[in-house]
Image (cartoon, grey):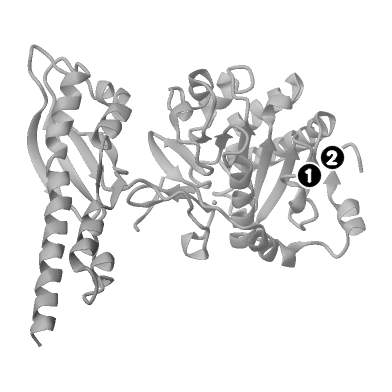
Amino acid sequence: MLFEILSTASMGLIAGSAYYLQNKNSLNDHDKIIKIADAAGLKAGGESIRIFRKVRREEYTEYVYKIPLGLSFKQFEDNKQLFIDGLNNKSQSDVNLANIKNINWKGDVMEQIKNIFNNRVMLDKHIEMEYDGMLKMRVYERGLDEMYPYNEDLLKGGWNVPIGCTLNEHITHDFESRPHMIVAGATGFGKSEFLKLIVSVMIKQQPDNVRLHLIDLKGGNELGPFKDLKQCVNFAREPKGAKKALEEIQEDMNKKLDDLFEKGIKDVKRAGQKERDFVFIDEAADLDDDSRDIVVDIARRGRSAGYRLIYATQYPTNETLPSQVRANIGARVCFRLETNTQSRAVLDEGGAEELPEIEGRAIFRRVKNYIVQTPYIEETEINEIIKPHIKEGKDVCHTNVKQSSGANSFKLETL
C-alpha cells in the first residue's frame, strides 16, 4: 500500500515538473518575439511592438501586438523565418506521461527519472501571422506533418477538391466558383501527384459530368493512366498533339459561347448544363507560341463555356506563365521552387524557394497565402477510383477518344 502511494506521488511530482517545464518554455515566447523584432530592426522612433493580448488555445498561443507607427505588416511577414528560427533556437525536455508510466519502480528509479529529464528533443514551433489593425502571431508547438494521407472524408462533393491541411484547418478549392488554377513546383516536390489527385477527385465526385482533356508533355507517364477513361476526350503527350487538342478545345468552346449568346444566357451554369471540361496541361513550358495563345484564350473566356484550366509547370518564368494567363487565374498551388524569380512568376512574390524540402509542402494562394501539406493519394487508391470508368478495351478507347498524342493529395473552409 505504501509503495503504491509513493509511486503515485512520484508520478504526480514528475508530471507536475513536466507541465512546469513545457509551460515555462511557452511563456518565454513573448520575450523572444520582442527580442527578435528589435534585433531585426522592427522598431520606429525607438518604439518596439507592445503586447496587447495573449490568448491560450488548445493548439496554439496567440500574441496580439500593437505595431509602432511607421512600420508595416509586410515588414514582419518578410521576417517570418527569423521569428521561427528564434523560437526554435534550443531544445526542451521530452517529458511525457508515456515515459512516466514506463518507469520500473523496482529498478533504479532515480536513474530512470534522470534519463527522462535528460531526454531532449529539438523544438518544432511554427508561427502564423495576421493583421487586422493589430499584429497577430499564433505560435504552434509543432509544425505541419510531413505526410497528409488522402481519405474520402476530405471530399465535399460538387466541384470541390481538397488542397491541403494548414496548421489548424483543411483547405478546399471550388472550381465552380473559381474555375482555373496554376500549379508549379520543381521536380520531386509533388506537382504531378497533385494533378493526379485532382483528376481522381473529379472522377470520384462527378463521373457523369466531367470531361477530361489531358496534355502531358513530360512523355505522358503522369497523366497516361487516365487516357483510357470514358471521361477522357483528348490526350496528348508531345507539342504537336497538344496544339491539335487545344485547337479542338477552342473550336468547341467557341460553339458553346455562340450557342449561349444566341439563347441570351450568360454561362453554362445558368443554362443548366452540368458538364464541365477540365483541361490539364502538365509542363506548359513546352507549348509552342500558337498553343500558348489558345491557352490564354481558354483562361480568358473558358469559364462561361464550362472550361476549367489547370496550368502546370516546373519551369515558371514570365515567358512560360504569360501575364494574360496569370491575370485570369487567381488560384495558385506552388510547391518548392529553386529561385525567388520563379516564385514571383507564380505567386507575384517570393516564398516558394524557402519552403522546406518536403514532398507535398506547398503555398496555396487565393487572396492570401496558406502554407499547406497537400493530400497524398496512393496509386492503389487511384486505380480503385478509375477502374469502373475504364473503357472495355484499349482499342475501343483509341477509337472513341481523340488521342492527340501524334503517336498512337478540423474545420473545412472553401476558398
Residue 304 point in image, percent of width and height: 58, 39
Going 65% across and 32% down the picture, which residue do you hit? 298
Q: CB under 8 Å between callouts 2 and 1?
A: yes
* Amino acid type, label 2: Ser
Q: Is residue 371 above or below residue 228?
A: above
Q: Which residue is mark 1?
A: 234
Q: Is residue 108 above or below residue 20?
A: below
Q: Quadrant of the N terminus?
A: bottom left
Q: Nearer the viewer, residue 357 or 213?
A: 357
Residue 308: in sight, yes or no? Answer: no
Q: Secondary structure at mark 1?
A: strand
Q: Which residue is mark 2?
A: 404
Q: Nearer the viewer, residue 194 or 230?
A: 194
Q: Left or right: where does residue 232 sit relative to residue 120?
A: right
Q: Nearer the viewer, residue 145 or 174?
A: 145
Residue 101 point in image, percent of width and height: 25, 72
* Amino acid type, label 1: Asn
Check the image and name the residue furthest to the top.
Answer: 45
Residue 75 point in image, percent of width and height: 26, 20
Going 58% across and 56% down the picture, which residue do you hit? 377
How would you rate the neighbour count of disc 2 (Cα within 10 Å): few for under 14, some for 14-19, many for 20 or more? Answer: many
